[in-house]
Image (cartoon, rainbow, N blue to C red):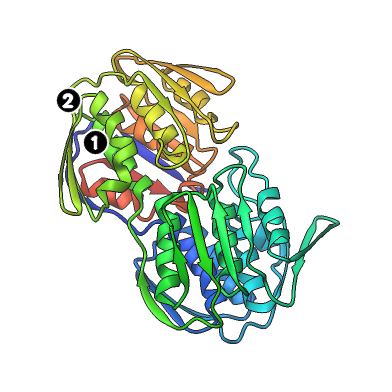
Amino acid sequence: MGQYIIEGGKSLCGSVRIQGAKNSALPILAATVAVGTPCVIHNCPDLSDIDATLKILRSLGCEVHRSVGTVSVDSSRISLNSIDDVLMREMRSSIIFLGALVSATGEAVMTAPGGCDIGLRPIDLHLAAMRKLGIRVAERHGKIRCSCKRVRGNKITLSFPSVGATENIILASVRASGVTTIINAAREPEIVDLAMFLNSCGARISGAGESVIVIEGVERLHSVQYAIMPDRIVAGTYMSAAAVTGSSVIIEDVIPSHLAPVFSCFEQTGCRIEVSGNKLRITAPKKLCAPDTIRTMPYPGFPTDCQAIMTAVASVADGVTLINENIFENRFRHVSELNRMGADIRVYDKVAVVRGVDRLQGACVDATDLRAGAALVIAGLCAEGVTTVNSIHYIDRGYDSLAENLTSLGVSIRRKD
């Protein structure tokens, strides 16, 4: 499983470059199935979730080659339209292949996806949308089969701006007959990145990043080379590392507008943020002030993926912070582990009350999911003594070279497998 061993209490100094966004790379790699011709994807991070996605692509008959930061996918010889249950269980994002396979082959067969246990992420929105597009959906013995001769464009109103459902609708309808309109679409930057990739392949998608997206179906798509945008959640993680250690760090290769929802939280803590082009400097005070309230919301609200790391930040800030988790009902699993390190956090249903303490103590803690693991690493950076974070395979799902990057900033962290 592996563990990180962290000696806390060291200041950070230097700069760190942000990897490509995991939550862009996964749907874009799946989208290469719908493209049907060779594509080259640059700035692709080295993550276990990327490994799982490439396994699925190869299992479908795609020719896949990988070098440092680059993945090439030739989906012109797809031989299967079903995904093995073992591969589906490796990650939640595997459901994104549903729309891509239907678009490419007219059929998709798979089981419900697996992944981090952070709460219910039902796929009923995905399946209801497929039906609206004229796709037959059959669920039997845990398997989902979607099929149609050709997808038909339609107007689809989502009851919740689901990122995954929005992506699946885009992928299913990009080569459909007619026009598809998504109302109450997810507005996340990763949706924009997917649409930009597909448009560069010849798709006609407008409105990505807004609540209404229009997809005009096209007959075919063409090959392209495309670079994944930087990961805003990883950028927020390194900002948290600087904040809890009272440090000043330069973070490169970011899109500052993507980080606007988290900037205000860091500024409330007393951190100073200076932006210049695609880089920023965060300078933290010696003692953080507690932000009053953090509410996770769909973009452009505060991202649920940053909730755990901000809980770690608030745990050593002066004052009380209320954290309201509105996206996933099981996303406070890191709290008990932070409390093992001396944090003072109480959870009441969807709200965590964080009372800042003077300092945390090193302890042996367990990562229970990707972002919880990142929060424990952040806590370990400012804790007295040694912190051991177990089950870091969760962290490997979303962070490329985390230990190496932190070491370059002056952190004493080593990986033990």
Mark 1 or mark 2: which comes first in sequence?
1
Q: Secondary structure at mark 1?
A: helix
Residue at figure coordinates x 55%, y 73% from the top left: 217
Q: Secondary structure at mark 2?
A: loop
Q: Position of residue 321 (x, y in %)?
A: 38, 18
Whether residue 66 is visible: no
Q: Nearer the viewer, residue 414 or 137?
A: 137
- Residue lying farthest to the bottom in this orientation: 77
The amino acid type found where label 1 is placed reads: Ala
Mark 1, Cα crowd under 10 Å, few <14 / some 14-19 / many 20+, is many
Q: Describe residue 53's horizontal placement relative to residue 313 as left or right.
A: right
Q: Position of residue 175 (x, y in %)?
A: 58, 75
381 over 346 or under it: above or below: below
Q: Nearer the viewer, residue 308 or 343?
A: 308
Which residue bears the numbered disc 2?
Answer: 285
Separation of residues labelled 1 and 2 (CA atoms): 10 Å
Q: How many marks?
A: 2
